[in-house]
Image (cartoon, rainbow, N blue to C red):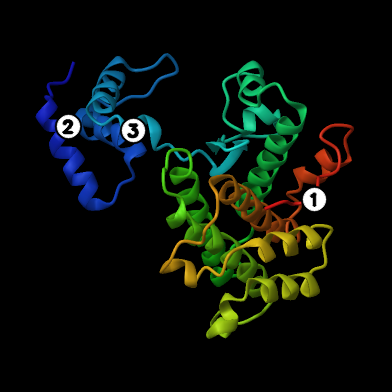
Amino acid sequence: MSAWTLNDLRRLDRKYAEEGIVVHQRPFRAAMELLGSGFVMSAVGNPDVKRIMDAYAAMVPEVETSWPGAGIGVIASIDQVRKALFPIVFGTVTLEPWQMAGFSSAKEWWNWCRQDLVIAAEVAFASADLHDFTMGLNNLVHANPDALTLWQMSRSNLEDAANTLPSTFSHDSVIQPICMVAELSMKAALVWDGIASDSFKGRDGHNLVSLAQRMAVARPHRDDARVQAVVASLPPYVASRYKPAGLKRLQVIRLALGVQFVAASSLRRITDADLAIQMEEDDWPGPRPAFIA
């Protein structure tokens, strides 16, 4: 057994913070560093590694809650919002809606959906959008770094909204990242198709309706009418930086789900990640209902 103390973990945590190591990776790194040549991971587990990682998690509880999975998005049951963690999968795996939404069982998911088939369908579609956005971005070849950067920034803003909405009392500040999810993902799709990334300067660069129209012309898709409905419902977010948009919590949540759909749609046009079409063609959930802000 190696000799280490809580002060060693505190010292390493400060070091990792200064180096920019994300929180969920720190316990494992600490185990490697403290055990040195004695660090061994085996099929049956290593008790020394487990002791260090458990002690780190006890010292920094955020270790357990900061895991990003393969992607982060939002799901909602009326105005009850949950941050959804899309799991990391290996090989060919069929995921149920409750698994994509990060629930531990189908029963937990069904109860959270209030045992309501309409709500469950909405949650399933939101999970499909998270799947298509996550898998679509992961499947892109690194041929257009400017477009990839825009999609990654769109994902970052979606994560901000997902982290904020479940517990926030005031939702006015969430409007900005919600609008940015739509803007950045649509710009990414246009840049992927050859539009210069610096061509969006000026007021038209924030014209989301125009961006949606340009994306529809460049790559027509079954999602186009719904994308237009979502972006037409978004408030003028430059103005919303300085004064409240006057939206109810439920409206903001629907807009967050809407821009998650827009982001997913931007990649459904380019990649073969399209779980949504399978759900839309099944008996359940069936066709998506019209978007209502």
User: Do tag 1 and tag 3 residues touch (Cβ < 8 Å)?
Assistant: no
Residue nearest the observer in this picture, 10 or 293: 293
| Mark earlier in primary sequence (3, 2) | 2
For image coordinates 18% across by 39% down, the residue present is: 12
Query: Compared to 29, does 22 lie above or below?
Result: below
Estimate how packed mark 2 is, as few (under 14), some (14 to 19) or many (20 or more) residues with alpha carbons within 10 Å. many
Element assignment for label 1: loop
Q: Amino acid at mark 1?
A: Ala
Give the Cα separation between the discs numbered 1 and 3.
39 Å
Element assignment for label 3: helix
> Hey, which quadrant is residue 115 in on the image?
top right
For image coordinates 42% across by 43% down, the residue present is: 168
Give the Cα separation between the discs numbered 3 and 2.
13 Å
Between marks 3 and 2 in the image, the one whose residue lies nearer the viewer: 3
Q: Amino acid at mark 3?
A: Val
Residue nearest the observer in this picture, 242 or 140: 242
Estimate how packed mark 1 is, as few (under 14), some (14 to 19) or many (20 or more) residues with alpha carbons within 10 Å. few
Query: Compared to 225, does 254 lie above or below?
Result: above
Q: Which residue carries the number 3 mark?
A: 63
Q: Which mark is residue 9?
A: 2
Residue nearest the observer in this picture, 79 or 166: 79
Q: Which mark is residue 290?
A: 1
Can the viewer see residue 64 in this picture? yes
Give the x, y percent position of residue 122.
Answer: 71, 38
Element assignment for label 2: helix
Give the x, y percent position of residue 248.
Answer: 55, 49
Query: On the rendered structure, is 219 left or right of 267?
Result: right
Can the viewer see residue 193 in this picture? no
